[in-house]
Amino acid sequence: MTDGLDQQIHEGTKAMLLIELDGSAAEVNRDAAIVYKICEQSGMLSFHSARDEAERDKLWQVRRAIHGAIMGLCPKWLEEDISVPPASIPAMLDALQALALRENLRILCFGHYADGNIHLNVSEADAPLSRARADLVKKKIYFETVKLGGRIAAEHGIGSVKKEYLGLNLNDATLNLALQIKKMLDPKGILNPGKIFPQEVWNRAYKAD
């Protein structure tokens, strides 16, 4: 264990945490000691703390370098954005690891613990996913997410890419209510037409128009 800013990553590393604390100097020191103890009891391999803004920025460079690093592994990834209750993050990561082993995939995850947001990058073990494989893997990820009480979209929303899967998170009554509100505010369907709602539902709602 070290308390410094050596950016070398231990070869046994399976996960990295960036933990920020806020408050007075005394509060931060108190909470930092608690965080250190919890990490130590959890089997941490190394510990780095920032003592000023420059050192904080250096630690965050690890997070900022993720996209560049994964592009060096594979030129194209299936990118997904899901969320689960924070307490279910370990179970979701275990489910993703099991999926990767079953399907011979590479699944790299990073995100925000506080809101359960997990960003996923998925490829074959040594190549980008084909469209058919991407659709299959996407469905499997969504089903695992919903089983844990999660949502198929986090900060990036439903849009047009996930609209056909919206029923996994919303039952028919909720979906119809949302559509009624949409029609009240947009009776002609001219505001972002075809977005969010499954195409069949959209066509049925606006067919008379």
Image (cartoon, rainbow, N blue to C red):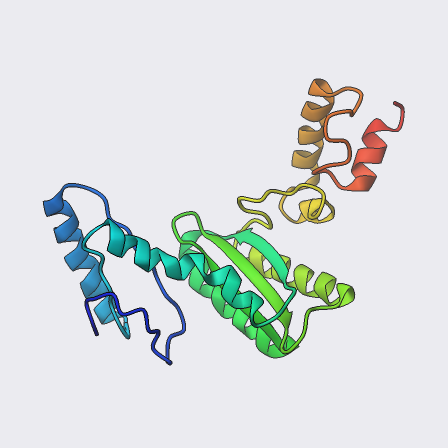
Q: Residue at x 19, y 41 (%)?
A: 23
| Residue 92 visible in the current orientation | no
The quadrant of the image that shows the N terminus is: bottom left
Q: Which quadrant would residue 74 be assigned to in this image?
A: bottom right
* Residue 54 percent location from the top left of the image: 26, 53
Horizontally, is 157 left or right of 62 in the view?
A: right
73, 135: nearer the viewer = 73
Horizontally, is 101 left or right of 209 in the view?
A: left
Horizontally, is 85 left or right of 31 in the view?
A: right
Q: Is residue 59 above or below residue 181?
A: below
| Residue 158 visible in the current orientation | yes
The quadrant of the image that shows the C terminus is: top right
* Residue 49 percent location from the top left of the image: 22, 60
182, 59: nearer the viewer = 59
Q: Is residue 42 above or below residue 83?
A: below
* Residue 205 percent location from the top left of the image: 81, 29
Horizontally, is 45 left or right of 137 in the view?
A: left
Q: Residue at x 53, y 44 (%)?
A: 155
Q: Residue at x 24, y 49 (%)?
A: 53
Q: Which quadrant would residue 105 be assigned to in this image?
A: bottom right
